[in-house]
Amino acid sequence: MLAASTGINLKTYGPGALSTAGYRGGAARHTAVRWNGMRLNSPLHGSVDLNLLPIGGMERIRLDAGASAAAQSGGTPGGLLDLHTGTDAVQAVGALELNGGMGAFGLMHGGGVARYGKDQNAARSWSARSSGQWSTARWDYPLRHPDWGDLGRMPDQELERIQWQQDLAGHNAKGDRWHAAAAISHVDRLLAPALFATDQGESERDRMGVATLQWQTRPMDGARNWSAFVRSGWAADQVLYRNRQAGIVSRSEAHSVEAGGGASWHPVQNWHLEAQAFLRRESGRSGGLLDPDALAGGTDTSVLRWEQRLRASAVWRPSSALAVRLDLLQDRYGGRWQPTLPALHLRWQHRFAPLVLQWEAGIARHYTRPALNDLYWHPGGNPALDAERGWNADLEAQLQGHGPNGQWTLVVQGWGQDIRNWIQWTPGHGGYWAAGNIGRVRGAGMESRLEWRWPKRGRASGGSWMGQLLYAWTRLHPQGGTVLLLQPEHRASGLLGYSSKRHPMANGTLAWSAGMRAVAVGRRFAASDGTRALPAYAPLGLDLGLVYRGPRWHARFGAHLENAANSWMDAAWNRPMPGRWWRSSLTLGWHGKADAQ
């Protein structure tokens, strides 16, 4: 859904394998990922494996870019993927859900969700949400090539994934709110071999843990309203990689701990000020070893870094139509002060019923430090690397319309960026890859999105339609080298769905829904000299759902057909994706009389 409904580009090495996000031409390290405010980007490699993310109980998923996200993302040019979990509204009794399903290529999954707590309308209340998921698959799908036809079946790529998440939230009699969350993910997977290679015995064991705690005071009444918050978080990531045929073992461990807080206040009516301060500790241990017996030979690299972050912002609203925001970000990392990163963002809105026109423009300075692997990975790390630095600017126009039959939104964005000292790993001498800086990379692009909702009214039909069309164009101009990225120049996607009205049935209601998802991705080059390119592809997904709601229980059934067009996809060189395949799920839930559904 993330790939179909946003302009983000997902680079994956197969179902359940490593998957990273790139945006606006950047690498995975250029897109910051946060979970309840905690930065998840590994200090070792700077990116996040999306298959490890705990996705249970997501309350909000937002992708932001440009000057509006520069300070929040820590100065990364690609933007911010912000994830927030919640406990759901629970009143007195709570609810329980159990789910399970199966699919093609040995896919099986199951899990459950429990919600419980004290009445949300009480002076003091709390609510909790516990969720767990498990899945396994073989992914032994047939190999196909557009020129050579069927090539047999993929050797088993066994996958087992276990995830657990716990949320706890509440408020006291004063109105102060608190939220605690913790999650853990464990993935064991055999990796897909290259298209024409024999099984190399590649395997990975990946583990991720994350926990956050936040306290938010109720905004104080009066002419100078103010509020404050404190937040702490912990994240850990461990990867063990083995290639039995080549005799390679690689291990990495990363830990991040941060704590801090902030305050916001309104000194006068048209001004809003914020200030935040955080202390973060990052540690990493990694080893890229060509001999498994050398794992205990002292060739691992261990690094510890401290970061102090100060952030201040001011918002000025001279009128209800205009808002101006200035952010300043200052980091001290590894005992050295980093460049100050300013960001300026303007928003102007004009209403002429039934339309609303909104303009946004911004400019920001960005600064991306080398990851610890870039500097110290053995072999290939380069301690002499310079940090990436530059500027980005963006302009957006948004037009909204609504009426008795529905609403629609049209968004058109244009952006440009200039990055110096771009960090890139390329094949070097001795058969291994090495990190280096290339002189300068300029990028430009645009993104357009049209979405609409059309609720049909009348006695005969109470269903509704929703749809979305998205197109993104990205162009990079490197100087002093070639950018080796699997980033398409053209990318389009579309969503179309229909939800029926609720039909009375057996003391309850029955409703159905159907949807279609399509993503079209253009050619991407996969060689540093630009001579090797991955093909364009356009997978199509179909969805069907049934929902029954009774007085005390409910049931949901979903069926999904992936890659319905049976197109040949190769997300990474010689790493083919499956053709047409299916999956299904069934969820049974119970809730108390006082629970709000």
Image: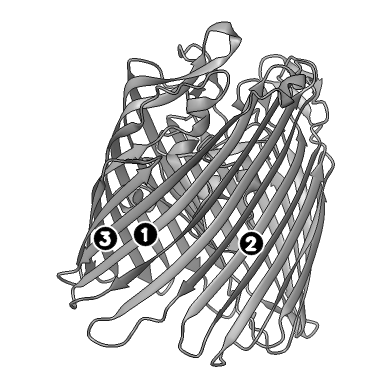
Figure quadrant of the C terminus: bottom right
Q: Is residue 263 above or below residue 489?
A: below
Q: Position of residue 554 (x, y in %)?
A: 76, 75
Dot 2 amino acid type: Ala
Which residue: 50% across, 69% down? Answer: 214
Q: Which mark is residue 277?
A: 1
> Which mark is in front, 1 or 2?
1
Q: Which residue is mark 3?
A: 313
Query: Helix or strand or loop: what does disc 3 sit on?
Result: strand
Label 2 crowd bin: few (<14), some (14–19), many (20+), radius 10 Å:
many
Nearest to N terminus: mark 2 or mark 3: 2
Residue 73 visible: no
Dot 1 amino acid type: Ala
Nearest to N terminus: mark 1 or mark 3: 1
Q: Nearer the viewer, residue 206 or 81?
A: 206
Indicate the quadrant where residue 364 lies.
Answer: top left
* Mark 1 and mark 2 residues within 8 Å of each other at the beta carbon: no
> Which mark is in front, 1 or 3?
1
Indicate the quadrant where residue 170 lies.
Answer: bottom right
Dot 3 amino acid type: Ser
Q: Which mark is residue 296?
A: none
